[in-house]
Image: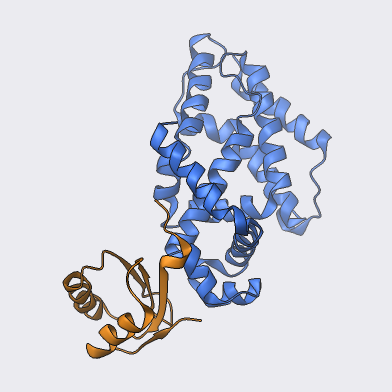
């Protein structure tokens, strides 16, 4: 089913490699985030999360804490 | 159509209704850009610039570049195959059925130039299997039935599907390609007229009919 647009969170990151992605996968799993994707073909490595519960700041904090850049994609 | 698919499509269309114009704009611009610069050079940033929207808006609708290309391709392939099946009955005689096919396909391609070029480009890409594997199956079934009926009724010889397609439709596709380019072999100027179209059809019919 297609998500509600207001539940989609978008971030510009530097999660570039397959290794980076698997590390982030573990972080997401640990925090029970199920619907997430990263566009690694894009220069901005856009992280896209669908969640009615998570806040922008929480994701930025979570990703930054693990050593990656993460800011809201505008 | 099964009920889940129906509900999904219904929900999808109602959710998107508020921004239908934007979605259509994105679709059209994406196909234009893909035809112009190819799959490799295409980026979400370039598309956002073309549409004069933020790249974030694109990511609301699509997960990534592949998702965008596949969604657009599936929607367009389905729309085009529906046009190609308009007023087409696989049970009619070979001549009438093939003529209807030529009419539909010519109309479909000529009135949807960008979509045609985009789908043609897709045919030789890695996206091909995913798009044509599922969505256009009804289309393939109907046209396969038509060919087998013609063989069964003794109107045409038994032949491989690929051979049949190459004689039945490839000439039409080639004429349309010349027409889109505005030139044919050796750069000769070319415009596809009704006369050229139906003269070619007669030759195709002669080649296939027993």
- Viewed as shown, does residue A66 lie left or right of B145? left
- Image quadrant for the N terminus of chain B? top left
- Image quadrant for the C terminus of chain B? top right
Query: In the picture shown, does residue B143 fall above or below B27?
Result: above
Question: Which image quadrant for residue B100?
Answer: top right
Whether residue B166 is visible, yes or no, is: yes
Image coordinates for residue A40, horizontal then vertical, percent: 36, 75
Which residue extends farthest top?
Answer: B153
The blue-coloured chain is labelled B
Question: Which image quadrant for residue A16?
Answer: bottom left
Whether residue B42 is visible, yes or no, is: no
Depth check: give the residue in front, B58 or B41.
B58
Query: In the picture shown, does residue B209 fall above or below B178?
Result: above
Which residue extends farthest front?
Answer: A53
- Viewed as shown, does residue A64 lie left or right of B89? left
Name the residue located 61 percent from the left edge and 57 percent from the top edge.
B18
- Viewed as shown, does residue B86 lie left or right of B125? right
Name the residue located 67 percent from the left edge and 21 percent from the top edge.
B206
- Colour logic: by chain
Q: How many marks?
A: 0
Q: Colour of chain A?
A: orange
Depth check: give the residue in front, B108 or A40.
A40
Image coordinates for residue B171, horizontal then vertical, percent: 64, 38
Name the residue located 49 percent from the left edge and 63 percent from the top edge.
B61
Query: In the picture shown, does residue B77 fall above or below A57?
Result: above
Image coordinates for residue B29, horizontal then vertical, percent: 64, 64
Image coordinates for residue B177, horizontal then vertical, percent: 68, 50
- Viewed as shown, does residue A47 lie left or right of B45? left
Name the residue located 48 percent from the left edge and 46 percent from the top edge.
B11
């Amino acid at each position: 089913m297609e998500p509600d647009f207001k539940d989609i969170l978008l971030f510009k990151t530097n999660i570039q490699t397959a290794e980076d992605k698997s590390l982030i996968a573990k972080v997401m799993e640990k925090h029970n985030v199920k619907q997430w994707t990263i566009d690694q073909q894009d220069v901005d490595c856009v992280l896209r999360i669908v969640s009615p519960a998570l806040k922008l700041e929480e994701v930025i904090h979570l990703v930054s804490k693990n050593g990656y850049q993460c800011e809201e994609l505008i | 159509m099964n009920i889940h698919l129906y509900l999904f499509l219904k929900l999808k269309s109602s959710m998107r209704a508020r921004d239908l114009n934007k979605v259509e704009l994105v679709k059209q611009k994406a196909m234009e850009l893909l035809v112009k610069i190819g799959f490799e050079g295409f980026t979400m940033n370039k598309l956002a610039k073309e549409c004069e929207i933020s790249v974030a808006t694109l990511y609301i609708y699509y997960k990534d570049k592949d998702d965008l290309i596949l969604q657009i391709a599936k929607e367009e392939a389905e729309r085009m195959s529906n046009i190609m099946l308009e007023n087409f009955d696989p049970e009619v005689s070979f001549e009438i059925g093939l003529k209807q096919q030529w009419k539909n396909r010519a109309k479909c391609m000529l009135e949807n130039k960008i979509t045609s070029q985009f789908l043609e480009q897709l045919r030789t890409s890695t996206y091909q299997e995913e798009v044509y594997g599922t969505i256009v199956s009804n289309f393939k079934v109907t046209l396969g039935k038509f060919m087998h009926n013609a063989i069964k009724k003794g109107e045409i010889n038994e032949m491989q599907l690929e051979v049949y397609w190459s004689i039945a439709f490839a000439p039409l596709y080639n004429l349309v390609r010349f027409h889109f380019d505005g030139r044919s072999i050796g750069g000769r100027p070319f415009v596809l007229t009704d006369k050229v179209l139906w003269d070619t059809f007669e030759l195709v019919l002669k080649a296939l009919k027993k």
